[in-house]
Image (spheres, rainbow, N blue to C red):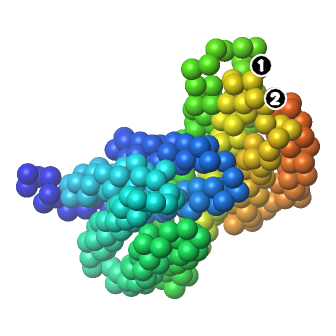
Amino acid sequence: MARIFGARPIATPETHRTTLFEIFFDLVFVFGLIRVTTFMSQRPAPMTLVQGFLVLLLLWISWLVFCWLGNYVRIDVGLIRAGTTVAMAAVFLAALVIPDAWQTGPGAEESRLILVLAYVALRVIYLVLFRWVMAGNQQLRRTIRIYALATALSWIPLFLGAMFGGITQILLWAAALTIDMGGGVVASVRSGWPVRSPGHFAERHGLVVIIALGESLISVGAGIGEERIRESILLAALLTLAVTVCLYWLYSASAATAREALIKETGLRRAHVGVNAYSVAHFPVLAGIIYVALGVEQVLAGLAHEEPHGTSIWMPAIALFGGTALFLGARATFLSLSVRCVRPGQFIAPVAALLLLPAGRYLHDLVALGLLTAFLAALLSYEARTRRSVSRES
């Protein structure tokens, strides 16, 4: 027992890579993403998209703080591993009650309070662990004090929102999560968060994007359910795989360039790139992918039950094309904050995706999914040709 809890933190080297324990930690995040998608698919409506966005942000912050901790010290040994394991339980509980967090009526307040208490417990564990590993580093202790103050302030609207429910809950939780996320940005500006292992940091964010992309494929099975597989369902499933592959290649090409830029940066500049390009800009990348997964599930459910949504409601088109636009816009922001070089086409792409949304609304679901696939494939081909052209010129 002394060997487990008495070990001092082990600082990560510059060349540190993602550990198996960190990938194991991500399992509860996978569960959380599934719960968010399930919640939104049960009651597809614009308000549900907003509610899903907020709980996604809560999950993102929960994952993010331990990503930063694992970049500074190894989280797979000693007291850090024990604390992170307890934090996994907190994330698991929070994810478990997500579908009930926005309900009204008897028992709803209890579910909201469970989510908030689990989140607060997780944040307390992180703050205690980070303060412990920062012993002797006065600059970083000042950073954690600023962040801890913002985090504690964010708990007030979180608890109030859980007690009130309804629209008040949405507004208060939005304010709480903005304060929490903003506190990290302010702390970075004032004192800086060290990115000790840039390769590890970029790798962790890339892996979580892959986890989100996996949700698109999981949504195929969720949408079909136990219905019989027909030709239209097979085609939709293959189109979903093609969309997922396109999103992956669009992200990975950008991520490789950004990773090299992060490694070359030093000091405060590297810290600011880590916070702005990765911690902040990656969240809408993830949210966009989850919205696409929601759209896929809606399309497959309509095809499986022979009830196409294409001419009845807007939600599948909003999720598919709106989620793609959010992903592409966030990717352009990510590049502008990391490599500081974004081609005009990368800013035009999210606008083009939004312009396709009305067409996706009135087309048959399968045709709309095919349109999205064709758009992403064309964008991927265009960017590949552009990169080859730039490479030849240089």
- Locate residue 248: give its quadrant: top right
Q: Tell me the residue that label 2 is attached to.
A: 366
Up/down of 14 relative to 117, above or below:
above
Instruction: Identify the residue at horizontal 60%, vertical 65% (top origin).
Output: 280
Q: For mark 1, does the 10 Å Cα neighbourhood hold few (<14), some (14 to 19), or many (20 or more) residues?
A: some
Up/down of 16 relative to 241, above or below:
below
The amino acid pointed to by label 1 is Ser
Relative to the observer, which residue lies in front, 17 or 345? 345
- Can residue 249 be seen at all in this image of the molecule? no
- Locate residue 342: give its quadrant: bottom right
Q: Tell me the residue that label 1 is attached to.
A: 232
Q: Are marks 1 and 2 in contact (CB under 8 Å)?
A: yes
Direction from residue 107 to residue 268 in the image, left or right: right
Relative to the observer, which residue lies in front, 188 or 372? 372
Instruction: Identify the residue at horizontal 62%, vertical 48% (top origin).
Output: 43
Relative to the observer, which residue lies in front, 131 or 340? 131
Residue 222 x/y as whole percent: 58, 31
